[in-house]
Image: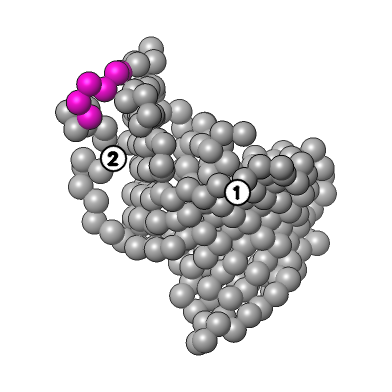
């Protein structure tokens, strides 16, 4: 599984599940729903945000990997930068810059792609309303003056490659702190937000790829 797919999955609710006849919302913890509703409304009120994060990757029989990155979003536009790549989408054009190859792939933005709304807390907080998960509070921990609530999500779709997800929420700050995904093959992915800046002012250049800043870049234009 590529890093891009992992990150997309983790903050875009981690996977795309098909709805079933089972009504997950009715089986979920009402107290967990109250916490999620409160956080969702807060995120929906932001015009933009930028977040720094770390991604821990644990695969059986392999050394643990850790990557760092930033994600920014304004409306439907987003910019994701990690160790090895930069992805920008201004809702018309998508740029995927591969740092090691000094190559950028340019394509038309696809509103139906999983990359639309890529890695956004707002999208994560919409998914629980659609019946894709059964969820419940599994722990509440006091860290100084902060209350950290852990909510566990289990996918309704039994064909999902993930068995469960754990989301840690800082109720006082009204922020998602960490998302942990448990894959059925024994792999674990931990996405931790280290800095979150809501309503950050972003200029037009933030959501476009300026090839003049990348001398010698190879451009692969995939637009029709």
Stretch of the chain drawn in magenta: 214-219
Image quarter where the N terminus lies is top right
Q: Image quadrant of residue 223?
A: top left
44 w.r.t. 58: above or below: below
Q: Name the residue under label 1.
A: 64
Q: Image quadrant of residue 92?
A: top left
Label 2 packing within 10 angstroms: few (<14), some (14-19), many (20+): many
Q: Residue 207 carries which label?
A: 2
Say whether residue 108 is magenta: no
Image quarter where the C terminus lies is top left
Q: Which of marks 2 and 1 is nearer the N terminus?
A: 1
| Magenta: main secondary structure | loop
20 w.r.t. 125: above or below: above
Q: Image quadrant of residue 95?
A: top left
Left or right, residue 37 beside residue 20:
left
65 w.r.t. 194: above or below: above
Q: Where is residue 162 in the image (x, y as percent from the top left)?
A: 73, 45
Q: Where is residue 15 in the image (x, y as percent from the top left)?
A: 64, 42
Can residue 162 be seen here? The reply is no
Dot 2: what SS? helix
**Which residue lies at the image location 29% right of the left edge and 18% below the top edge?**
218
**Which residue lies at the image location 24% right of the left edge and 56% below the top edge?**
201
Mark 2 or mark 1, whichever is nearer to me: 1
**Which residue lies at the image location 73% right of the left edge and 53% below the top edge?**
164
């Amino acid at each position: 599984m590529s890093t891009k797919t992992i990150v997309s999955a983790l903050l875009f609710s981690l996977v795309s599940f098909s709805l079933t006849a089972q009504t997950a919302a009715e089986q979920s913890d009402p107290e967990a729903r109250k916490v999620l509703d409160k956080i969702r409304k807060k995120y929906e009120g932001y015009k933009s945000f930028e977040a720094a994060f770390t991604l821990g990757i644990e695969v059986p029989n392999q050394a643990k990997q850790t990557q760092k990155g930033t994600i920014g979003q304004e409306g439907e536009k987003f910019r994701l930068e990690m160790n090895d790549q930069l992805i920008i989408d201004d809702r018309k054009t998508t740029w995927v810059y591969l740092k090691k190859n000094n190559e950028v792939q340019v394509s038309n933005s696809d509103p139906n792609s999983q990359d639309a709304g890529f890695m956004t807390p707002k999208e994560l907080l919409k998914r629980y309303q659609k019946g894709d998960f059964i969820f419940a509070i599994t722990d509440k921990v006091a860290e100084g003056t902060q209350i950290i609530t852990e909510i566990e999500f289990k996918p309704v779709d039994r064909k999902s490659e993930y068995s469960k997800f754990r989301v840690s929420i800082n109720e006082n700050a009204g922020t998602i702190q960490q998302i942990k995904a448990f894959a059925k093959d024994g792999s674990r992915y931990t996405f931790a937000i280290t800095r979150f800046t809501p309503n950050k002012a972003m200029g037009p250049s933030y959501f476009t790829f300026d090839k003049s800043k990348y001398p010698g870049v190879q451009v692969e234009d995939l637009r029709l």
